[in-house]
Image (cartoon, rainbow, N blue to C red):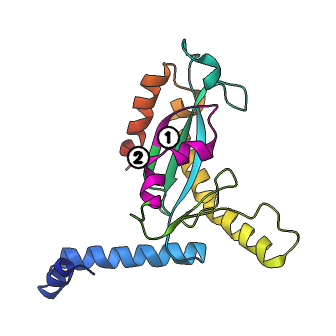
Amino acid sequence: MEVTKLKQIRTGNKRAITRLLTKIEEFRRNEDLTGMPQVLGYIDGTFVRISTPRENEPDYVNRKGFHSLNVQMVCNNNFIITNCVARWPGSCHDSRVFRESQLCHDFENDLYSGFMLGDPGYPCRRYLMTPYNHTNEIRHRERFNGALCRTRVIIEQTFGILKWRFNCLSIGLRTNPNRACNVLWHVPYCTT
């Protein structure tokens, strides 16, 4: 604990105590939810349909065959978006979007203590847990994969809530990629 936090608590600053208790409670809720301590968030990518771009058109065609941006988001167990990267064409893989993100660089430089949970589209790292590719019917691997999938469904539900609340994310943004990136960058701020 930082010295300033200790001083605030000793002097009876109720707001500091409340914030500290809230953080402890959030940590406990997150651990109860995942069964794993220090889970900072859940990461995944989603496609947001856009109009056909005039430049580099093939880059924006995703694996499903339509023009889109690949939007990477991280949320916590309260469905609050804590990170959003919305600048990559739909043809880019989730792992590349993450590898090039500031969030990845921050984790690589040990700016966060804890880890995220992701799907098999991401590489397994010391700060990013993903399911086993082949469980070979080994019971503890199957249980781990099941627990991980049940837990990281939170990011899928977050995407569903976003696309329900902002229908344009579901039906598509009728604009060019640059303007779509600007719109998507503001989405996390509209949801809190």
Q: Nearer the viewer, residue 98 or 72?
A: 98
Please give the name of the residue rendered at 67% of the width and 50% of the height, measured from the top-left corner. Answer: 121
Q: Is 88 placed above or below 154 here? A: above
> Residue 54: percent from the left, percent from the top?
54, 11
Of the residues tagged 2 and 1, which is closer to the observer?
A: 2
Please give the name of the residue rendered at 64% of the width and 61% of the height, measured from the top-left corner. Answer: 124
As drawn, the label of residue 106 is none
> Residue 69: percent from the left, percent from the top?
56, 31
Q: Is 3 placed above or below 19 here? A: below
Residue at the front extreme? 109
> Residue 17: percent from the left, percent from the top?
24, 80
Please give the name of the residue rendered at 61% of the width and 47% of the height, measured from the top-left corner. Answer: 95
As drawn, the label of residue 165 is 1
- Give the residues drawn in magenta, as a range: 85-108
Classify mark 1: helix, strand or loop: helix
Q: Is residue 106 left or right of residue 34?
A: left
Residue at which label 2 appears: 191
Please give the name of the residue rendered at 55% of the width and 42% of the height, measured from the top-left corner. Answer: 97
